[in-house]
Amino acid sequence: MDDFKNIKNGLVLPSIGYADQPKLIEADNGTWVYTITTGEGAEGTKNTFVGIALSRDLGKTWSELKRIDDSPFESSYSSLFKTDFGRIYCFYDFNVDGLNTDDEIEEADGTVSRAQRFDMGFGIFCFKYSDDNGQTWSKKRFEIPMRDFDIDFANPIKVRGKTRRCFWNVSNPFALGDAFYHPMNKIMYQNGDVLYRTEGVLLKSNNLLTEKDPEKIRWETLPEGTKGIQSPAGTRISEEHCFVPLSDGTIYDVFRTIDGKPGYTRSQNGGRTFDALRYQCFADGTEMKHPRAANFVWKCKNGKYLYWFHNTNGEEWGGRNPAWLCGGVECDSENGKTIKWSKPEIVLFSEDKKEGMSYPDLFECDGNYYLAETQKTVTRLHKIPEEFLSGLWSEVDD
């Protein structure tokens, strides 16, 4: 039997060069809908776009990769969500003003740098939708308003005389009760560093789950106040936030830091406030190790959880090979539910030690578990044996 942990044994998914943040969802008619941020250049360069492809044979073959947005301007970092009435939303960043490499970015301290990143910041966060299982998408894009926080005002930048805000997202939206939530990361741009300081927020809609007129969808930015979710140590990086709802309504959030450890926090009031900032721990209380890389938590259809991380504090941007999984189950804490995590097991690796895999997505279909991942040039889909996952859960499943 092929070693499912070796990434070379995975199913290659469509892309055209740069490949990032693969996402999958199953439409009501069984079609697999797939999005990818891709382009002929490298990460952050011009002509990056969100592509969409469909499969009707469980991922064996795919339709032609098409742009979600017909504009020649860049789109990036998509996510997918399906409502109970079958509508599929695709959320993404969009370079609405056509920022280009000739544009100068004027910072608050008077310094000026050239525009270089086209995959995050400076534009809008928006969505399109499909009411025919991903076959066609709305011609119009709809902007999602975001409330400004202190981080936005701390170092405002201007392009063509217009103040811009910086942001991006890597993880999936979720529903909790009657509300819809989408993760977001705010960025403070400084000294030419587009990721100088970061913090997490949630975009909430109290009517997206039922409202069919996209013009009537309402939005608010959480948490309350003017500060997002920050690092437990107070360091400047708290980013790539990934949220899941627990059975009692608690919102559980994990995120990457530059502290050599992954952070987490929880909210018991629908995201209005979050409790003490902590570092992720195993069930025995030992703190986990993790570099500046995506770490994701997923809620499975069986009510249990999986956590993707790299189990090393390595170099700030390194340590992405291999990838590890922990199994999680809910348990009681002093203030609501939390997740108890098993010891980790390697789930994916590359024989090339320099090749790291990241920005994963968990996809469940017909009782099967799949993980998508990317090395930024190749994206693959891996079927994960249920017995492997059951072994993780059994360690903490009392």
Image (cartoon, rainbow, N blue to C red):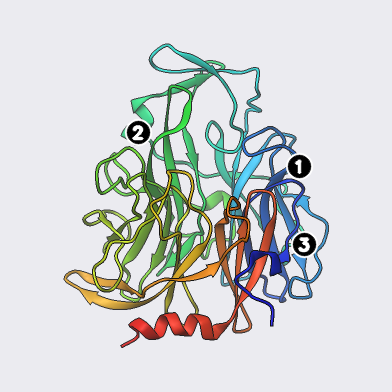
Residue linked to disc 3: 135
**Residue 320 visible in the shown view:** yes
Q: In this view, does 191 lie above or below 289?
A: above
Which label is found at residue 151?
A: 2
Element at badge 2? helix
Q: Do the residues labelled 3 and 2 touch (CB within 8 Å)?
A: no
**What's the residue type where badge 2 is placed?**
Ile
Residue linked to disc 1: 70
Question: Quadrant where the N terminus lies?
Answer: bottom right
**What's the residue type where badge 1 is placed?**
Asp
Q: Which of 80 and 391 is in front in this view?
A: 391
Element at badge 3? loop
- Label 1 and label 2: CA atoms lie apart by 32 Å
Q: In this view, does 169 lie above or below 98?
A: below
Tell me residue 387's x, y (percent). 53, 86
Q: Considering only order in the chain, which callout, 2 or 1, is on the residue closer to the N terminus?
A: 1
Q: Nearer the viewer, residue 279 or 349?
A: 349
Count neighbours of disc 2 (C-alpha within 10 A) and say few if under 14, some if 14 to 19, many if 20 or more.
many
